[in-house]
Image (cartoon, grey):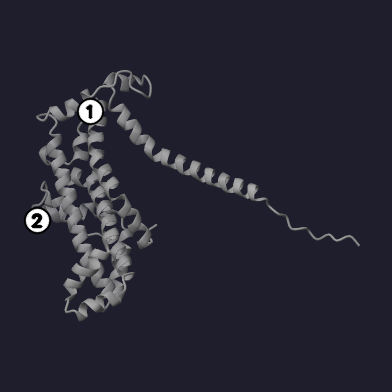
């Protein structure tokens, strides 16, 4: 009788190593292709900003025939018609203030909901998280009416105060605070620390990755915000960079070269901030389980 059972196949070490290398190269190729998709628009913006307007309109090729910094000189040197330094200062002030407020308010709210046994705390947390599903555009009209009643329209407060608290920050820090051992807080309490002192001396120092993640996300969101400044501000000297750049576009003519040069200037601070805090951002996302 002939046995039909399959004989176990053996894979040589050389073949297994070749398969591992093949999978690794395939994975690296996919990662490189994905990174290229995100980097390519930024690279095209940077390269095109070095072209004169005629080359941009006629599209004489991807690379400039005669690279020039004239677009940047005109944007940075014509402060009377293009107050880009004023717009830059407005963007830094508003984005920085919003980031500071969000970190402060979210830290207090998340700590109270995560650590204090408040009656109905879980329900309050669920209500706050559920507001993440409400599009911000829906709140634009009621916020505008409130700001008009307070007389805050066309002021920085119109952009800072309404954006100073958000459900995302509370959710992110709440998840991180739950992972901090209670033993540390109990030990600090035995040493005589108050709740505020425990938050300041124990919880917040351990939460630097999550705070850095929330801070950079908030700063980028406030920096790139276009709709809010467009609706709430009227004076050109109070515009932020995204709204100011939009002035280069009109109904009949568009200054593509100046628009791209100003866009590069607008992108640099965010890019620098990400490069400085990328380690903390990745660590914060990993520790909070944010997907």
Checking the image for residue 258, the label placed there is 1
The image shows residue 219 at horizontal and vertical percentages of 23, 50
Marker count (numbered): 2
Q: Callout 2: 10 Å neighbours few (<14), some, many (20+)?
A: few
Residue 126 or residue 85, whichever sits in front: 85
Q: Residue at left 21%, top 81%? A: 190
From the image, state whether disc 1 or disc 2 is nearer to you: 1
- Residue 38 is left or right of residue 254, and the answer is right
Q: Residue at left 22%, top 49%? A: 222
The image shows residue 115 at horizontal and vertical percentages of 27, 74
The image shows residue 23 at horizontal and vertical percentages of 56, 47
Q: Secondary structure at mark 1?
A: helix
Residue 214 or residue 144, whichever sits in front: 214
Residue 102 or residue 270, whichever sits in front: 270
Checking the image for residue 288, the label placed there is none
Question: Sequence-wise, which precedes: disc 1 or disc 2?
Answer: 2
Gap in angstroms between the C-alphas marked 1 and 2: 37 Å
Could one spot residue 181 in this view of the protein? yes
Residue sitting farthest toward the bottom: 190
Q: Residue at left 19%, top 79%? A: 191
Residue sitting farthest toward the front: 13
Location of mark 2 (residue):
150
Residue sitting farthest toward the right: 1
Q: Secondary structure at mark 2?
A: helix
- Residue 93 is left or right of residue 266, and the answer is left
Quadrant where the N terminus sits is: bottom right
Quadrant where the C terminus sits is: bottom left
Could one spot residue 118 in this view of the protein? no
Figure check: 25 above or below 282 = above
Q: Residue at left 33%, top 36%? A: 42
């Amino acid at each position: 009788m002939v046995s039909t059972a399959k004989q176990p196949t053996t894979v040589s070490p050389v073949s297994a190593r070749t398969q591992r290398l093949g999978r690794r190269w395939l994975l690296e190729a996919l990662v490189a292709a994905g990174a290229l998709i995100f980097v390519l628009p930024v690279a095209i913006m940077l390269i095109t900003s070095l072209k004169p307007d005629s080359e941009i309109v006629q599209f004489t090729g991807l690379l400039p025939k005669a690279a020039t910094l004239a677009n940047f000189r005109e944007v940075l040197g014509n402060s009377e018609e293009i107050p880009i330094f004023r717009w830059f200062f407005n963007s830094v002030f508003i984005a920085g203030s919003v980031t500071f407020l969000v970190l402060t308010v979210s830290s207090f709210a998340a700590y109270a909901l995560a650590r204090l046994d408040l009656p109905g705390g879980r329900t309050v947390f669920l209500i706050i998280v559920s507001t993440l599903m409400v599009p911000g555009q829906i709140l634009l009209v009621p916020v505008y009416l409130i700001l008009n009643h307070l007389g805050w329209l066309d002021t920085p407060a119109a952009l800072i105060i309404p954006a100073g608290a958000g459900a995302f920050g509370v959710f992110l820090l709440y998840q991180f605070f739950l992972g901090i051992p209670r033993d540390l807080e109990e030990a600090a309490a035995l040493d005589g620390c108050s709740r505020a002192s425990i938050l300041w001396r124990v919880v917040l120092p351990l939460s630097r990755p999550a705070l850095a993640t929330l801070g950079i996300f908030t700063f980028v969101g406030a920096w790139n915000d276009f709709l809010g400044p467009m609706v709430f501000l009227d004076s050109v000297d109070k515009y932020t960079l995204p709204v100011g750049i939009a002035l280069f576009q009109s109904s009949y003519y568009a200054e593509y070269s100046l628009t791209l040069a100003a866009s590069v200037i607008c992108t640099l601070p965010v890019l620098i901030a990400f490069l400085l805090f990328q380690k903390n951002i990745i660590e914060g996302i990993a520790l909070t389980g944010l997907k």
